[in-house]
């Protein structure tokens, strides 16, 4: 399991990235530095997503790496920084103000010179190029604020509408604006597919992180799914209820599996040059999700796929990219 970066490490990264960007002699050079540091974040935090993004064309891959950094840091504020909730929310509020300030400036070097964090200087550039609506990032940050004061969700609809929309669906929308839609489809078609895939990915993460989330005082298993197995929110802590908890997790994973099936069937809504990466994402995370559909995935241990298991579900005609990715050449 990865060791999370602490706030000091993020601050050192900020200082290093800012120094490189300030020395950049052009916007193109500044962009290369932002992508370089964003790739460092992605590779450190998500080996699976890092791998599947290697199947994107270079331009889209760079934009996706910057998007990943833009959501990773706010997520870390509420997930790993040992700060009081009021301080976490204050940091998220400041982050959102900086984002809207970044949108008012032209150019990454100008943004950094104005004191905008390098991540937001880059994400504002992606948002402008890909026409990502500003309210989507606000919705994402709203879900992060909810994590600072967690509360249970009555049912799946409440979970999706009140949390997953901001935590995963709009992130899928960010990516869709970068990927683009197929000539025979519309952006609405692609966004619809992104919505179902985003829900599926988030539910799989909930299934995998049940124990870690409970340690943080969070519960993403809907109360009605727990009740169907004779459980309440308090019962999730009792090892005697592990079998019932596993069944509740399985219910969540079944919903996710249907989302992966929808995304697979509608993959051609996206632009052709993005489909290999999106398809690889579907297959890798669906393979992980299916661990929770069987009998052997305890909700009290973090489940992951080995490198070999990931490799087996990747598109065969893209295998050549895998060693290049791990060598840092893609």
Image (cartoon, rainbow, N blue to C red):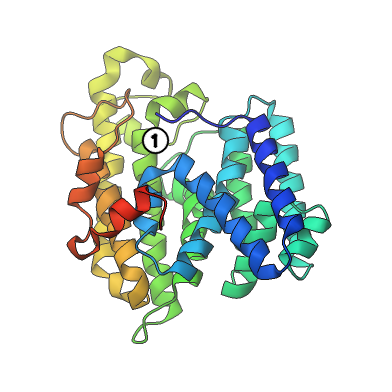
Which residue appears farthest toward the bottom when viewing the image?
Answer: 184
Q: Is residue 234 left or right of residue 7?
A: left
**Pick the front one: 37 or 153:** 37
Q: Position of residue 299 (x, y in %)?
A: 30, 27
* Quadrant location of the N terminus in the rendered image: top left
Q: Is 267 or 112 nearer to us in this picture?
A: 112
Does 172 sit left or right of 139 as displayed?
Answer: left
| Circle 1 SS class | loop
> On the image, which quarter does residue 275 sit in?
bottom left
At x 72% / y 61%, what residue is drawn?
24
Query: Does residue 87 lie above or below 162 as drawn?
Result: above
* Residue topped by disc 1: 221
> Which residue shows up at 56% across the image and 33% down it?
79
Residue at 34 percent across and 43 percent down: it is: 204
Tell me the quarter of the image containing the C terminus. Answer: bottom left
Q: Are there few (<14), some (14-19), or many (20+) residues within 10 Å of tag 1?
A: many
């Amino acid at each position: 399991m990865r060791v999370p970066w602490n706030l000091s490490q993020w601050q050192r990264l900020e200082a290093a990235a800012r120094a490189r960007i300030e020395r950049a002699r052009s916007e193109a050079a500044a962009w290369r530095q932002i992508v370089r540091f964003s790739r460092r974040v992605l590779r450190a935090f998500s080996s699976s997503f890092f791998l599947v993004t290697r199947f994107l064309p270079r331009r889209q891959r760079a934009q996706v790496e910057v998007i990943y950094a833009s959501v990773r840091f706010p997520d870390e504020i509420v997930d790993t920084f040992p700060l009081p909730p009021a301080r976490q929310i204050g940091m998220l509020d400041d982050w959102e103000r900086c984002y809207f300030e970044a949108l008012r400036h032209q150019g990454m070097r100008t943004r950094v010179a104005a004191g905008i964090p390098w991540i937001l200087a880059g994400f504002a550039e992606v948002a402008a190029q890909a026409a990502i609506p500003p309210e989507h990032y606000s919705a994402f940050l709203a879900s992060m604020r909810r994590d600072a004061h967690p509360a249970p969700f009555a049912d799946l609809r409440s979970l999706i509408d009140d949390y997953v929309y901001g935590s995963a669906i709009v992130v899928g929308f960010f990516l869709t604006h970068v990927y683009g839609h197929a000539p025979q489809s519309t952006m609405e078609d692609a966004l619809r597919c992104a919505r179902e895939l985003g829900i599926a990915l988030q539910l799989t993460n909930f299934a995998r992180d049940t124990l870690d989330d409970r340690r943080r005082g969070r519960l993403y298993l809907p109360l009605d799914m727990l009740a169907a197995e004779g459980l309440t929110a308090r019962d999730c802590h009792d090892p005697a209820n592990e079998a019932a908890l596993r069944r509740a997790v399985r219910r969540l994973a079944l919903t996710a599996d249907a989302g992966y099936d929808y995304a697979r069937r509608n993959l051609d809504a996206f632009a052709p040059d993005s489909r290999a990466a999106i398809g690889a994402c579907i297959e890798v995370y669906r393979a992980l999700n299916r661990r929770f559909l069987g009998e052997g995935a305890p909700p009290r241990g973090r489940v992951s796929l080995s490198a070999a298991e990931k490799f087996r579900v990747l598109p065969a005609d893209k295998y050549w990219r895998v060693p290049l990715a791990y060598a840092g050449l893609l």
